[in-house]
Image (spheres, grey):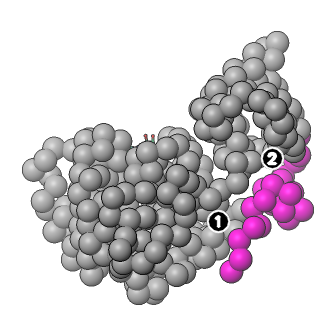
Amino acid sequence: MPKSGFVAIVGRPNAGKSTLLNRLVGEKVAIVSPVPQTTRNQIRGIVNHSEGQIVLIDTPGIHRPLHRLNQRMMKSVHAALEGLDLVLLIVDASIPFGEGDRFVLSLLKEKNLPAFLLLNKIDQMEKPALLPLIQRYASESNWLEVIPLSALTGENVDLLLQRIFGVLKESPCCFPDDQYTDQPERALAAEFVRERILHHTREEVPHSVAVIIEKFEEGGRLVRIYAAIFVERASQKGILIGQKGRMLKQIGSEARRELERLLNTKVYLELFVKVRPRWRDDDTALDEIGITKIRT
Ligand code: GDP
Ligand code: MG
């Protein structure tokens, strides 16, 4: 009988949650970026392994809620913690333990969930620095395991998988074994476009951008995708479009190539940019963008 279960990856923004999820799943299902808070909704990845199946939940970075968007993100963190078999708390081992980590810890204690502590980014550390760190963290909570690893290089990721299956119970799998995410293809398309925007724009634009797929048409040997990019100011629109439309073209062709790989078909991708002041504090806009689709 195979094993299976639901496992959430939680941790501060930038700890490496999305990188780990992608590494475990072996497919790009969550976007990865050096800009914190790139993951706004829970995205699931499915690991199909000879021992069974793991359904992974990637959560938005945990932090104290500020404006309305962040409050909704926190709701999705709480929602992601319900009905789980295991929580993986991932921390960036190369920076000091901070207030944010303590906040996450108290959340886990409150929920009383079995948890592993993952000390990530050990590729950036001297090995002797690890032991005191493990001892320091081990005393903070009742971890089932404390595992140093690198989501980026894959070091110790097999060990992590082994230990996860050590915790999961025998039970039938939830998804067909050729499926690696339950996210609708549209949502992934929007995330891919957003990732390319974050990659190319840095400070000026990132947190003011939302991508909505307005049309997703499958027909013949081509998928046609029409995506609207929302920004808050006209100046941001200018940056995104770029000189003679070059920036938008670049973003579009990179996202299209990734989508073609994901969907395994030719893709026609059309992007347009719209200015929508203060969409992050506008409930109607948030509904449209799909940030409400979380039940709590
Ligand atoms: P998230 O906000 O927790 O989802 O973090 P991401 O997965 O988006 O990663 C944030 C940044 O840390 C990215 O630039 C990653 O490439 C980097 N990163 C993630 N894991 C590792 C790691 O094991 N080693 C190193 N050196 N960098 C990492
Ligand atoms: Mg992320």
Q: How many marks?
A: 2
The span picked out in magenta is 275-296
Separation of marks 1 and 2 at Cα, in angstroms: 18 Å
* Quadrant (top left/top right/bottom left/bottom right) for the C terminus: bottom right
Type of amino acid under label 2: Ile
Magenta span contains residue 287: yes
Lateral position of residue 124 relative to residue 11, left or right? left
Q: Tell me which residue sits at (71%, 27%) in the image.
A: 266
Q: Residue lying farthest left?
A: 128
Residue 2 placement (x, y as % from top left):
37, 70
Foreground disc of the pair 1, 2: 2
The answer, for residue 107, to whether it is visible in the render is: yes
Looking at the rendered structure, the secondary structure element under dot 1 is helix
Query: Observer-nearest residue: 241 or 101?
Result: 241
- Give the answer, above or below, for where 141 lies relative to 220: below
Q: Position of residue 64 (x, y in %)?
A: 57, 69
Instruction: Answer whether residue 193 is magenta in the image.
Output: no
Left or right, residue 4 beside residue 283: left
Mark 1, Cα crowd under 10 Å, few <14 / some 14-19 / many 20+, is many
Q: Residue at x 63, y 34 (%)?
A: 264
**Extreme residue in the front direction:** 1
Q: Amino acid at mark 1?
A: Met
In the image, residue 116 above or below residue 265: below
Q: In the image, which disc is placed on residue 212?
A: 2
Q: Which residue is mark 1?
A: 73
Q: Is residue 16 visible?
A: no
Q: Nearer the viewer, residue 292 or 180?
A: 180
